[in-house]
Amino acid sequence: QVQLVESGGGLVQAGDSLRLSCAASGGTFSRYVLGWFRQAPGKEREFVGGISPTSISTRYVDSVKGRFTISRDNAKNTVYLQMNSLQPEATAIYFCAARPGTVPVITALDYNYWGQGTQVTVSS
């Protein structure tokens, strides 16, 4: 059983940067694909980015490519999401998720473990 705890959310202005962290416990972190998802009010949960266990492979939704970067530190059991040039449409609850495997996938149902989420609000 893997437990995930996100942190780093907050209120920022358009154009600002924010780094989210997700600390994992209870499993062999280096065996899991990690993903970041977000859910805005009234919308479905959306894949943001994912990273393979050894960081060889990353994947992003088109809307964040070039501005968001996902990384992980297996020694610290932590995955990060660096978000630059934030815009109001990025406002959402951000969740990290984990699944056994080697390739980041974009479907939420394919992830076995979820954190509680952290709120990101971007003001215009």
Image (cartoon, grey):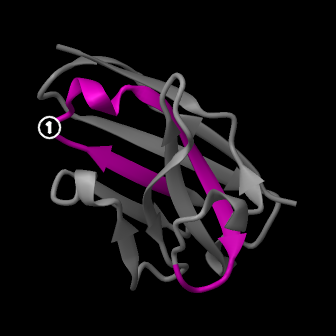
Give the quarter of the figure containing the C terminus.
top left
User: Where's residue 44, x and y in %?
Assistant: 56, 40
Helix, strand or loop at label 1? It is: loop
Q: Is residue 57 left or right of residue 46?
A: left
- Look at 54% across and 73% down and name the residue there: 105
- Residue 123, by quadrant, is top left
Q: Is residue 116 left or right of residue 18?
A: right
Q: Mark 1 is on which residue type?
A: Ser
- Residue 34, by quadrant, is bottom right
Magenta region includes residue 40: no
Q: Is residue 55 left or right of residue 3?
A: left
Q: Which residue is mark 1?
A: 85
Q: Which residues are magenta?
A: 79-103
Tell me if mark 1 has few (under 14), some (14-19) or many (20+) residues whose alpha carbon lies within 10 angstroms of its own: some
Eyeballing the image, is 16 above or below 66?
above
Q: Is residue 8 left or right of residue 31?
A: left
- Look at 38% across and 74% down and name the residue there: 58
User: Where's residue 8, x and y in %?
Assistant: 45, 31
Give the quarter of the figure containing the N terminus.
bottom right
User: Where's residue 45, x and y in %?
Assistant: 56, 43
